[in-house]
Amino acid sequence: MFKCHCCSGECKKSGHYRNRNRVVQRFLCVRCGRSFSESQPLDGLRLDHSKVVQIVRCLTEGVGIRATARLVDCDPHTVLDVLGTVGEKCERLHDKWVRDIKTGSLQIDELWSRVGVREGEVQAARRYSPAPYVGVTIETIAGTPRADRICTSHVERCNLTVRHFNKRFVRLGLGWSRKLENHRASVALFVAAYNFCKVHSTMGCTPAVALKITEHTWTVEELIDEAAMDQLLP
């Protein structure tokens, strides 16, 4: 039961209208007589839902902001608005759903990207020249891991996937983030799409299905709807 935003009284349905996103229900408070609309799942976006889906599909496939704008025929700032709105909701959805995961092993490695500065201002001219080989020392710093299973092959492959499907991590490119909030939204969108929408070749399903978080592979449209509607639930 919806409550009035003014007096918290009970409300009844009072017509509806359709905007570019969806059919919006109107409500009337039986106590104070005020009317209001239900909360919008993609608040702040005045864009056709089909175009929002197109934009998110491009972004999750590693297409840059300006290229996405050209492909879907809209302004680059509109693409950034969609990224910020959907990315923030995907971050909350992922943080709520992906918890208490049990795994048999972990591989950890660094993954860097630039935010707000040009590459020439922070990196040496020979940044990508081969570094001099000094040596390798294996040392256990925590727990009792099996030495025969210590490697970084899987996490390095994961890093490659990140750089391939997220333009902001591509080296020697122009897709670096100018603002931290855009970078954060881009990472959240990539992680959510990777876990819920992309079928892993070695497992034959998405990570979310493998961990029984969901029962089927989500489409990008399902991810957007789930992330948006999850914010409207009490």
Image (tube, rainbow, N blue to C red):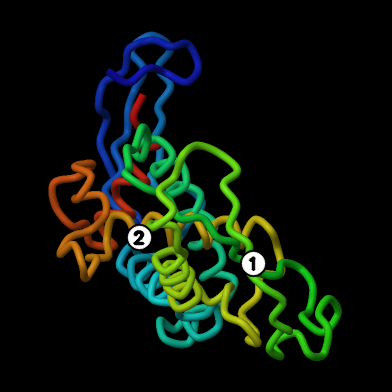
Q: Quadrant of residue 130?
A: bottom right
Q: Is residue 200 left or right of residue 146?
A: left
Q: Is residue 130 left or right of residue 28?
A: right
87 or 16: nearer the viewer: 87
140 or 196: nearer the viewer: 140
For the point 47% across and 65% down, the residue is 152
Residue with the mark numbered 2: 193
For the point 48% across and 79% down, the residue is 74
Position in image of residue 141 (x %, y %): 60, 43
156 in relation to 22, above or below: below
230 in relation to 139, above or below: above
Evaluate whether residue 20 shows in this view.
no
Q: Residues within 10 Å of mark 1 (few under 14, many from 20)?
A: few
Give whichever of discs 1 and 2 has the lower sequence position.
1
Q: Quadrant of residue 21?
A: bottom left
Residue with the mark numbered 1: 112
Position in image of residue 27 (x %, y %): 32, 28
122 in relation to 209, above or below: below
Location of the C terminus (image quadrant): top left
Evaluate whether residue 49 shows in this view.
yes
158 or 218: nearer the viewer: 158
For the point 27% across and 30% down, the residue is 14
Position in image of residue 100 (x %, y %): 36, 32
Q: Amino acid at mark 1?
A: Trp
